[in-house]
Image (tube, helix red, strand yellow):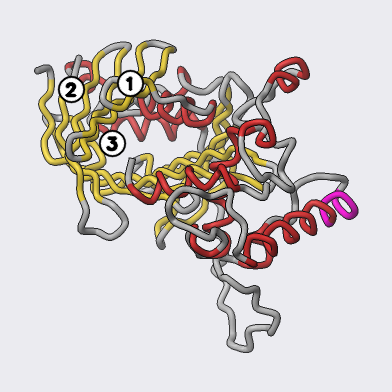
Amino acid sequence: MNKIKLILIAIAVAAAGQQFFGSRSADAQAKVETAGQKFKNIKVLNDVPADQIGPIMNIMSASLGVDCKMCHASNDRDFEKDGNEHKDIAREMLKMTFAINKQFFEGKTEVTCNTCHGGRERPIAVPNLMQVVREERPKQPATKPTVEQILAKYEAALGGKAALAKIKSRHITATRVEPDGKTTEPEEIWQEPGMFRVDTRYGDYLISEVVEGEKVRKTGNKEPITLRPDEMEQIRREAQLFANPDLASVYTKLDFRFVDRIDGREVYLVLGTTSSGARERLYFDTATGFLVRRVATAMTVIGPFPFQVDMSDHRDFGGVKLPATVRYAMPAISWTRKIQEVRNNP
């Protein structure tokens, strides 16, 4: 893992603070280890599932545009220490947010850290006196396109059914670029029927993400890494959607919603529902047909934890076009994959 991700997840042990992609039964909920059971010095989020603490810390970090040092007294991973007044303030802010949602929104998570902070350390109370130009939604088509038409255009954009059928496996070499734009790590990707694997090397440390059928696993130097349900789901989805226009086999339901706009380009927004009932937003470029963005969301007790994948710079690799640049982003964490070479049917 990159250094940022390790730090943000590690601060879970000091959290002052429900499900992920699908619901858990009451019996399962009762067996879930809580933050109060797993970590030290928990003052507010004692009853929250322990596996939510990492995402919650990331949401708070991104909502205020700050890092761990804002609330934690040290950077030596002894995060349960008190002594930083901002940690006490954060605890009170969490209580306030929970109280607002309970009193005014029937307990639903409508007000979050980001509602007031919007990526700033301190909320801005004074109205913006500059004219705000709001971009209108694009004009909607007189006749709505069907999902079948959108997927057919996507298949043609990738290269067509015949070209896709010729490729039984792939070996891809790529580079992972960190947010600073300078730090990079080599990546290798293998794809074949029923198997998808991504290896990322951080010096002597090798992270492997593997999907074999319905099984998903992640290792660090061959040692198992525990995955949250949402992390497992996103690794699985990456394998399912890679150069695959048959989205009907991935989602149990697909609905066209409306024409939207991303970076000035018009896109079709399609809502995909998984077998577990989770919904993901899929954006297809109306002109090129390519899938250019996917957004999934996991719920935490302080608000949604989004996972966004942006695909661009589609290039021809042996008769099939793949996005040579893929940006992955979630609260306080992002990286970009740059494909260097693709060997088909190695």
The label on residue 170 is: 2
Q: Nearer the viewer, mark 2 or mark 3?
A: 2
Q: CA distance from mark 2 to mark 3?
A: 19 Å
Q: Is residue 331 left or right of residue 177?
A: right
Residue 291 vs residue 138, the one in the foreground: 291
Residue 126 vs residue 89, the one in the foreground: 89
Residue 300 x, y percent position in the rendering: 65, 41
Within-10-Å neighbours for mark 2: few <14, some 14–19, many 20+: some
Instruction: Say which residue appears at 58% left-offset and 33% top-offset.
Output: 51
Give amino acid for label 3: Ala
Any part of residue 3 in sight? yes
Please identify the dominant SS of the magenta region.
Answer: helix
Q: Which residue is mark 3?
A: 157
Q: Earlier in the sequence, mark 1 or mark 2?
A: 2
Instruction: Say which residue appears at 36% left-offset and 18% top-offset.
Output: 211
Q: Check if mark 1's residue and mark 3's residue have beta carbons within 8 Å.
A: no
User: Is residue 125 covered in magenta?
Assistant: no
Q: Which residues are magenta?
A: 100-105
Instruction: Say which residue appears at 26% left-offset and 33% top-offset.
Output: 158
Any part of residue 19 in sight? no
Q: CA distance from mark 1 to mark 3?
A: 40 Å
Within-10-Å neighbours for mark 3: few <14, some 14–19, many 20+: some
Give the answer, above or below, for where 65 lies relative to 212.
Answer: below
Pick the quarter of the image with the N terminus.
Answer: top left
Give amino acid for label 2: Arg
Q: Is residue 26 left or right of residue 276?
A: right
Residue 319 vs residue 214, the one in the foreground: 214
